[in-house]
Amino acid sequence: MASTYDLVEGRNEISERVRAATLRAALEVFRPGDRILELGCGTGRDALALARHGVHVTATDVSPEMTRVTAARADREGLGSRVRVRALSAADAAELEGPFDGAYSNGAVLNLEPDLARVGRGLARGIRAGGYAVLTAANRLCLFELAVYPVALRPRKAFRKLGRPVPIPISREGLGRRYVVPTRFLTPEEFRRTLGKGFEVRDLRGLQIITPPWNFVDLARRFRPAVEPLVRLEDRIGSRRGLRALGAIYLQVFRRTSE
């Protein structure tokens, strides 16, 4: 899967917008020379993007194959001194010895972690006071789905994320459709509470609020001329109170407090 992951996931322009937004947020708070921990590095695209800006990344993923691909890419680009890799789950990675200047996780990696509270405790120990955690997660509620599924006569799907974990394919492209994982959805507030003490929310932005979520990529492509203005509008309203907690994905920037 690692050998074809970028070909699969890189084709999903909706997921790529999430990646771009998360990297922008990270580069607003991380500085050259900072040492950060990435949870769920995949094939290393985000780690390398941060390393190109001078950030030192400990890139972790539960898949040893993914970390091998990440290390090879870093070496090819001459960034091996800035990118270290470890094959670890998010909970185990969060307990790596710091201090780190921050943490980073893009996508819904943390929705797959069964012990998010343990992740929070580890990050609270490992991130220095004043450091940042830039984290995205998948939401229980999505305004787009709440509007579209009832119209499509599938109202139960609009609320399927409110209960137990939902089996979700890791991608809507190619072979990724075959790999289904149980995903635990959390509202931004549930995520913050589960992460635990020691962090304050500095920014919250909803993604895929009024635009098709990643699982609607085929629909988004079919109606691209109608979707593109919505993308621009969502960029302006994504952090507004009342809307920011209604994206299929949300991006939160946490600051490590001194307590």
Image (spheres, rainbow, N blue to C red):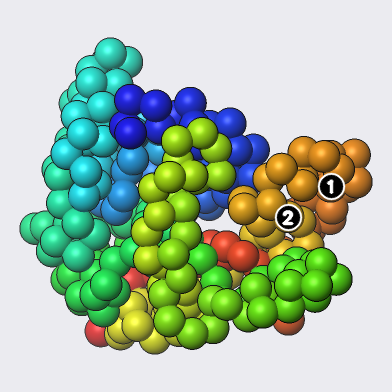
List the residue tagged with mark 2. 212
Residues at marks 2 and 1 touching, judged by CB atoms closer than 8 Å:
yes
Quarter-wise, where is residue 210 in the image? bottom right
* Residue 77 shows up from this direction: yes
Q: Residue at (20%, 65%) from the top-left corner?
A: 91
Q: Is residue 85 found left or right of 253 in the rendered image? A: left
Q: Amino acid at mark 2?
A: Pro
Report the disc number at residue 227. 1
Q: Residue at (32%, 43%) from the top-left corner?
A: 41
Q: Amino acid at mark 1?
A: Val
Mark toward the start of the polypeptide (2 vs 1): 2
* Residue 30 shows up from this direction: no
Task: Classify mark 2: residues with Cα within 10 Å, few (<14), some (14-19) or many (20+).
Answer: many
Judging from the image, what secondary structure is the residue with disc 1 in?
helix
In the rendered image, which quarter contains the N terminus?
top left
Residue 35 in picture, x, y percent from top left: 25, 46
Give above or below for 153 relative to 45.
below
Residue 72 in picture, x, y percent from top left: 23, 21
Q: Is residue 186 found left or right of 150 in the rendered image? A: left
